[in-house]
Image (tube, grey):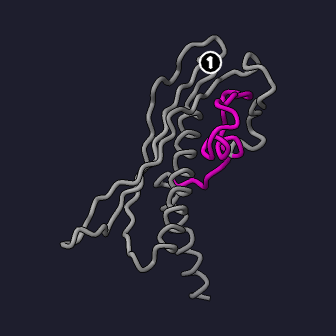
């Protein structure tokens, strides 16, 4: 009996603590717009993942639909993947790379007014290099780029969720 009481008291205490700190489970995003165009179409992997991430919440215009039907037009430009040497050993052999993924955003409403102009999002990850495990490191590099791409898509969605109906 006492053990059950202590468990319930602990559960209530943890629940109250989480509620007071502002913790909230992630829900679907609410956008002030219902139609968006993403250019270029189909675009790189980043643009395609962004289209998929809207789900049913927002209609993403297809390539054959005119841009005039969109409430917002998002242009993804200069998607650049870089691999920079950041560490070498005493013999001059590469030991560490830094992977970077950059993308520029331009967002305008249906009237052509710029809401976000030239915003650059950058993600970077460090990766060690070992000559004896080249294939494994290539696979790791692909996974890191995919992870950076997902992070950038989430950042774009957060920025788009701040667009207000008065800006449309």
* Quadrant housing the N terminus: bottom right
* Quadrant housing the C terminus: top right
Residue drawn at (63%, 21%), measured in percent from left and top?
165
Q: Position of residue 119 (x, y in %)?
A: 45, 30
Residue drawn at (32%, 58%), measured in percent from left and top?
85
Q: Is residue 80 above or below residue 77?
A: below
Res. 46 image quadrant: top right
Q: Which residue is mark 1?
A: 109
Tag 1, which secondary structure?
strand
**Towards the viewer: 48 or 84:** 84
Q: What is the span of residues highlighted in magenta in the rendered image?
A: 23-52
**Farthest residue, direction right:** 64
Q: Position of residue 51 (x, y in %)?
A: 69, 41
**Farthest residue, direction left:** 90
Residue drawn at (53%, 17%), measured in percent from left and top?
114
Residue drawn at (57%, 53%), measured in percent from left and top?
24
Q: Position of residue 123 (x, y in %)?
A: 43, 49
Res. 109 image quadrant: top right
- Residue 84 relative to residue 32: left or right: left
Q: Position of residue 156 (x, y in %)?
A: 55, 39
């Amino acid at each position: 009996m006492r053990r059950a009481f202590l468990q319930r008291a602990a559960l209530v205490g943890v629940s109250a603590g989480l509620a007071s700190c502002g913790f909230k489970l992630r829900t679907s995003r609410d956008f002030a717009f219902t139609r968006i165009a993403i250019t270029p179409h189909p675009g790189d992997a980043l643009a395609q993942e962004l289209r998929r991430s809207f789900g049913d919440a927002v209609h993403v215009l297809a390539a054959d639909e005119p841009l005039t039907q969109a409430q917002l037009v998002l242009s993804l430009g200069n998607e650049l993947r870089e691999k920079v040497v950041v560490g070498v050993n005493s013999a001059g052999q590469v030991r560490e790379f830094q992977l970077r993924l950059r993308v520029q955003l331009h967002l305008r409403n249906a009237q052509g007014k710029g809401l976000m102009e030239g915003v650059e999002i950058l993600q970077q990850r460090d990766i060690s290099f070992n000559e004896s495990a080249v294939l494994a490191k290539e696979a790791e590099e692909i996974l890191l780029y995919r992870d950076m791409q997902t992070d950038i898509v989430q950042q774009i969605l957060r920025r788009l969720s701040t667009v207000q109906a008065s800006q449309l």
